[in-house]
Image: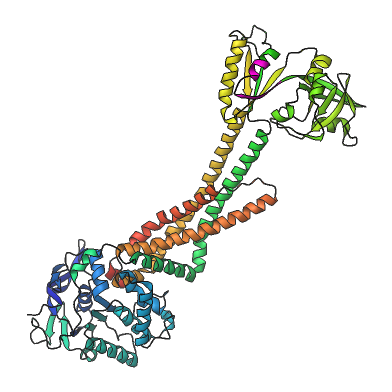
C-alpha cells in the first residue's frame, strides 16, 4: 500500500488553560493525503479548518496526536527543522496575500529561495520566470500596493512555487478577489494540480471546493465527510508522475547554513533594513538624531580635550621636559644652604645620562635704557643656553664662546625686556643698556616664550656670558643653580638618581642640594588634561546611551508594526536566527548610518572650532572608538526587540493586525 504523503492520526488542538477556559478546536482528526491529490477542506467559520491548515503546514503544533510526513513523525522536530520543512515542502497562498509591503514582486517571490541558500543569479532567474509564467513579467519591480488583488495573489502563488512547492496550501485564495480574478487564481491551482503538485484548498465556498478532486468537510473540529471512498487507500486522483515527497532525512543539515545561504540572507536583511529606513524617513531621522548627537559629542569632546592637552603640553614642553635644576639647599633649618661649585658641574658633565649642563649665575637686577627703568632677571649663562632651553634668538644673535672666554659685556634680552626698554620704536641690536650701572651691548632678542607658571615670566630675562656675570655683576664664580638636560626625557628619574649619587659623593655624603624638574609638572598637567578629556567623553557618552534607547524604542515599534511580516518570513522558511539576524541588521544599520553622520557632524563642528582658534585634535582611535560604541550600542539595544521578533509564534504573527 502506498504511504500517504501526509498522515494525521487523532490530531487534537486546544487553546487556553490556566486562568482561561480550555477551548478544543480540533477533536481527533484522522486524515491521509497522497501525492498528486487536489483536496478541498470546507467548513463554516470557526469549524477549525484554518487551524487544521496551520498544523498541516507546520506553522502550528497539535496539542496531541501524530503527524506523519512521508511516513515519518514530525512531532519531534525542532523549530529550525520545521522551518526547513516549510521551506522545502510547502508553499502558502493566503486570502490576504501576505506580501511584504516594502518589497517588490520579484523580492517577495525570491524570499523562500533566499532562506534555502539558492545562488543569487539562479534565484533572480527563477523568480522572473515564475512571474512571467503567471503574466506578471512587466510587474517584477512593482510593490504590492501597486498591484491589483488578483496580481498580488498571483505573486503569492509564484512565491509558493519558488522552492518547488510540492504541497500548495491555499487558505481562501479567492476570498478577497472579484469573480474574474478568483476564476484566474482557481485556474492556476487547477494547472498546478495537473502538474503533480499536492493542492490543499481551505474554503467555505462549496462552488470553489467542487474544483478539487476530493472534498473534506469539517465541522466543530471533526471531519464529517470525505469524498474519497477509502481514505486509507491511494485515491484514483493520485498519479504516478506526482511530485516526490521531500526526504525528511535531509533535515539533519538544516541547522547549518550551506551554499552561502547566510550571504543571501544578510544581503536581503541589509536591503530590507534600508527600505524600511527610507520608507519611514522622518521617524528614522528622529531615531538617528540621538546616535548622531552622541557620536558627534564624543568625538568633538575628546578632540577638544586632546587639543587642549597637546597645546598645554607643547607650552610646557617649550620650557624643557627633560630639564633638571640643581641648586644648593640647607640640610636642616639650622644650617646654611650648600654651595654648588664649578667642580660639581664638571663632575656631572661626565655622566652618561647628561646631555648638556649649564651653570647659571644670576639674580634680579635693575636695568636702564635712556629714561626707561626696569627690573629683570639677569642670568650668566654659557653658549648652551639656546639649545638647552630650546629658546632661539629671533632678532640679532647669541653671544659666542669668545665672548664667554673674554668676559665680554654683551647681553641677549627677553621679549618683555625689549618691550619695557625700547617700546618697539628703537632697534635694540647694538644699543647699550645699563645692568646695575654696568653697560652691556645688546646682541640679540630671545623668542617670546610666555610663562611656565603664574608666578614668573620667562620673557622678563637677560642672558649674559657666565664669566661677565661673575666678574662684572655678582663677584662670585659659583653658580646660583645648574641646568642639566637629560639625554632621554622618558628617563628623567634615572638621570636624577645618577646626579644625586654623584653629588653625594662630591659633597662627602652631605645632602646640601636639591633637584627639581619640569617633567613631573608636565606629567601632572597631562594627567589633569587626560582626566578632563575622560570626563568630557563620559558626559558625551550619555548621549550615545540615549541614542541606544532610541534604537531599542524604534525597533520595538518596528517589531510590533511588522509582526505579520515576521509571520510571512517564517511561513516561507525563515528560522528564528534568520528573524533575529533581520532585525539585528536593521538596528546595526541605524547605528552605522547614525555613526557615520555623527562623525561627519563632528568633523564639521571641529572645523568651525578651528576657525575660532580653539585647539582641536582629532584622533583616529577616538573616532573609531565612538563609531564602535555606536555600533555596539545598536547591537545591545537592538538585540532584545530582535529576540522578541524571533520568538514569535508563526500563527500568532500571521494573524496579527
Is residue 205 visible in the rendered image? The answer is: yes
Left or right position of 559 against 25? right
Find out whether residue 354 is within the magenta segment.
yes
Q: Give me the residue at 49% from left, 64% from top.
A: 284
**Residue 578 on image: x %, y %:** 33, 64
Looking at the image, residue 29 sits to the left or right of residue 394; the answer is left
Q: Is residue 99 visible?
A: no
Dividing the picture into quadrants, the one containing residue 114 is bottom left
Task: Judge by depth and name the residue closer to the eye, 330 or 515.
Answer: 515
* Front in this rendered view, residue 347 or 622: 347
Residue at image location 82% in from the left, 16% down from the top = 473
Q: Nearer the viewer, residue 212 or 34?
A: 34
Specify the quadrant of the image occupied by residue 374.
top right
Q: Kindly identify the residue that appears in the image at 41 percent across and 82 percent down.
A: 140
Q: Is residue 616 rendered magenta in the image?
A: no
Span of residues in magenta:
345-358
- Residue 143 in the image: state x and y as whole percent: 43, 79
Q: Position of residue 283 (x, y in %)?
A: 49, 66
Which quarter of the rendered picture does the C terminus lie within?
bottom left
Residue 374 is left or right of residue 539, and the answer is right
- In the picture, which quadrant includes the N terminus? bottom left
Q: Is residue 104 above or below residue 566?
A: below
Query: In which quadrant of the rendered view does residue 461 lie?
Result: top right
Amino acid at each position: 500500500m502506498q504511504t500517504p504523503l501526509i498522515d494525521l492520526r487523532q490530531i487534537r488542538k486546544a487553546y487556553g488553560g490556566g486562568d482561561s477556559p480550555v477551548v478544543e478546536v480540533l477533536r481527533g482528526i484522522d486524515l491521509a493525503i497522497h501525492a498528486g491529490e487536489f483536496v478541498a477542506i470546507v467548513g463554516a467559520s470557526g469549524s477549525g479548518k484554518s487551524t487544521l491548515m496551520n498544523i498541516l503546514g507546520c506553522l502550528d503544533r497539535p496539542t496531541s496526536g501524530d503527524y506523519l510526513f512521508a511516513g515519518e513523525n514530525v512531532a519531534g522536530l525542532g523549530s529550525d527543522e520545521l522551518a526547513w520543512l516549510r521551506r522545502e515542502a510547502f508553499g502558502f497562498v493566503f486570502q490576504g496575500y501576505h506580501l511584504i509591503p516594502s518589497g517588490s514582486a520579484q523580492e517577495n517571490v525570491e524570499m523562500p529561495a533566499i532562506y534555502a541558500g539558492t545562488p543569487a543569479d539562479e534565484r533572480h532567474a527563477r523568480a522572473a520566470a515564475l512571474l512571467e509564467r503567471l503574466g506578471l513579467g512587466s510587474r517584477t519591480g512593482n510593490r504590492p500596493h501597486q498591484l491589483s488583488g488578483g496580481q498580488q495573489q498571483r505573486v503569492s502563488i509564484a512565491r509558493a512555487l519558488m522552492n518547488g512547492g510540492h504541497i500548495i496550501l491555499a487558505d481562501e485564495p479567492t476570498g478577497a478577489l472579484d469573480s474574474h480574478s478568483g476564476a484566474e487564481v482557481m485556474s492556476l491551482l487547477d494547472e498546478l494540480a495537473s502538474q503533480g503538485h499536492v493542492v490543499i484548498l481551505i474554503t467555505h465556498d462549496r462552488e470553489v471546493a467542487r474544483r478539487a478532486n476530493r472534498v473534506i468537510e469539517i465541522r466543530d473540529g471533526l471531519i464529517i465527510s470525505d469524498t474519497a471512498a477509502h481514505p486509507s487507500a491511494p485515491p484514483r486522483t493520485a498519479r504516478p508522475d506526482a511530485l516526490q515527497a521531500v526526504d525528511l532525512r535531509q533535515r539533519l543539515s538544516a541547522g547549518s547554513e550551506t551554499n552561502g545561504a547566510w550571504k543571501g540572507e544578510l544581503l536581503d536583511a541589509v536591503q530590507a533594513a534600508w527600505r524600511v529606513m527610507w520608507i519611514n524617513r522622518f521617524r528614522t531621522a528622529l531615531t538617528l538624531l540621538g546616535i548622531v548627537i552622541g557620536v558627534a559629542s564624543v568625538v568633538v569632546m575628546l578632540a577638544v580635550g586632546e587639543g587642549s592637552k597637546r597645546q598645554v603640553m607643547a607650552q610646557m614642553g617649550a620650557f624643557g621636559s627633560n630639564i633638571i635644576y640643581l641648586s644648593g639647599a640647607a640640610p636642616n633649618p639650622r644650617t646654611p644652604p650648600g654651595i654648588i661649585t664649578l667642580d660639581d658641574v664638571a663632575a656631572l658633565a661626565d655622566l652618561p645620562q647628561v646631555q648638556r649642563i649649564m651653570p647659571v649665575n644670576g639674580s634680579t637686577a635693575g636695568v636702564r635704557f635712556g629714561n626707561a627703568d626696569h627690573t629683570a632677571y639677569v642670568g650668566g649663562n654659557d653658549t648652551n643656553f639656546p639649545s638647552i632651553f630650546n629658546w632661539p634668538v629671533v632678532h640679532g644673535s647669541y653671544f659666542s664662546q669668545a665672548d664667554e672666554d673674554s668676559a665680554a659685556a654683551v647681553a641677549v634680552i627677553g621679549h618683555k625686556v625689549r618691550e619695557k626698554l625700547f617700546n618697539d620704536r628703537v632697534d635694540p641690536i647694538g644699543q647699550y643698556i645699563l645692568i646695575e650701572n654696568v653697560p652691556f651691548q645688546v646682541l640679540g632678542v630671545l623668542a617670546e616664550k610666555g610663562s611656565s607658571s603664574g608666578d614668573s615670566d620667562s620673557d622678563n630675562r637677560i642672558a649674559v656670558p657666565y664669566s661677565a656675570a661673575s666678574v662684572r655683576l655678582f663677584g662670585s664664580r659659583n653658580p646660583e643653580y645648574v641646568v642639566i638636560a637629560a639625554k632621554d626625557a622618558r628617563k628623567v628619574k634615572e638621570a636624577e638618581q645618577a646626579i644625586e649619587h654623584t653629588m653625594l659623593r662630591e659633597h662627602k655624603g652631605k645632602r646640601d642640594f636639591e633637584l627639581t624638574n619640569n617633567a613631573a609638572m608636565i606629567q601632572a598637567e597631562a594627567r589633569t588634561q587626560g582626566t578632563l578629556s575622560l570626563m568630557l567623553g563620559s558626559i558625551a557618552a550619555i548621549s550615545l546611551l540615549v541614542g541606544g534607547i532610541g534604537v531599542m524604542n524604534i525597533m520595538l515599534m518596528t517589531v510590533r508594526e511588522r509582526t505579520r511580516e515576521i509571520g510571512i518570513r517564517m511561513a516561507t522558511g525563515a528560522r528564528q536566527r534568520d528573524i533575529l539576524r533581520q532585525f539585528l541588521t536593521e538596528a546595526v544599520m541605524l547605528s552605522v548610518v547614525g555613526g557615520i553622520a555623527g562623525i561627519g557632524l563632528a568633523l564639521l563642528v571641529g572645523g568651525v572650532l578651528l576657525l575660532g582658534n580653539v585647539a582641536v585634535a582629532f584622533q583616529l582611535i577616538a573616532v573609531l572608538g565612538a563609531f564602535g560604541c555606536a555600533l555596539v550600542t545598536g547591537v545591545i539595544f537592538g538585540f532584545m526587540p530582535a529576540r522578541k521578533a524571533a520568538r514569535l509564534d508563526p500563527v500568532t504573527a500571521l494573524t496579527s493586525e
